[in-house]
Amino acid sequence: MILEIVTPEATLLHSEVDLVSVPGVNGEFQMLNNHAPIVSLLVNGTVKFKGVNIVIEEQFEEKFTNIKGEFTLPIKSGTIEMKENKVIILAD
C-alpha cells in the first residue's frame, strides 16, 4: 500500500509500505494491505510504519527514527484516510 504523510510545510513521505500504525482518538490502530476504508482523527503520539525499500528524502530524514526497520514519526494531531490501498495522513 502507499503511505503519504503531509504536514502544513511539506509532503514528508510518499512510499510503498507493508503496515502503518497510528494514534487514533480511541487508541492506537494498525492497517495492512487491503484494509477496509477508514477516516479517523489522530491524537498526540507516534506514526509507525514498516516496509521494504522505504526512501525518505534527505531533507526530512531527521524527522523520522528508524529502529530495526520500523520507522517512527511523532505527531501532535491529524487526520488519516485509508482508501483503495492508499493511506494519507495529514499531520501537525
Image (cartoon, rainbow, N blue to C red):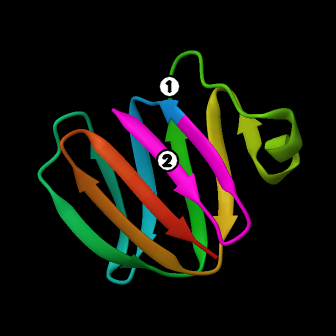
Above or below 73: residue 58: above
Q: Give 79 or 19, whichever is nearer the viewer.
A: 79
The quadrant of the picture occupied by the N terminus is top left
Chief secondary structure of the magenta portion: strand
- Residue at the disc numbered 2: 4
Q: Earlier in the sequence, mark 2 or mark 1?
A: 2
Neighbor class of circle 2 (other Cα within 10 Å; few <14, some 14-19, many 20+) is some
Query: Residue 40: image x %, image y %?
Result: 30, 75
Please name the amino acid that badge 1 sits on. Answer: Gly
The quadrant of the picture occupied by the C terminus is bottom right
**Quick check: marks 2 and 1 in contact, CB under 8 Å?**
no
Above or below 88: residue 76: below
Residue 28 - label:
none
Magenta stretch containing residue 87, yes or no?
Answer: no
Within the image, what quadrant is residue 34 found in?
top left
Query: Residue 73: image x %, image y %?
Result: 67, 56
Outermost residue toward the left in this view:
36
Which callout, 2 or 1, points to the residue nearer the camera?
2
Q: Relative to residue 81, is residue 74 drawn left or right?
A: right
Within the image, what quadrant is residue 39 found in?
bottom left
Q: Give the CA separation, mark 2 to mark 1.
A: 13 Å
Q: Give 76 or 83, whichever is nearer the viewer.
A: 83
- Residue at the disc numbered 1: 51
Q: Give the range drawn in magenta.
A: 1-14
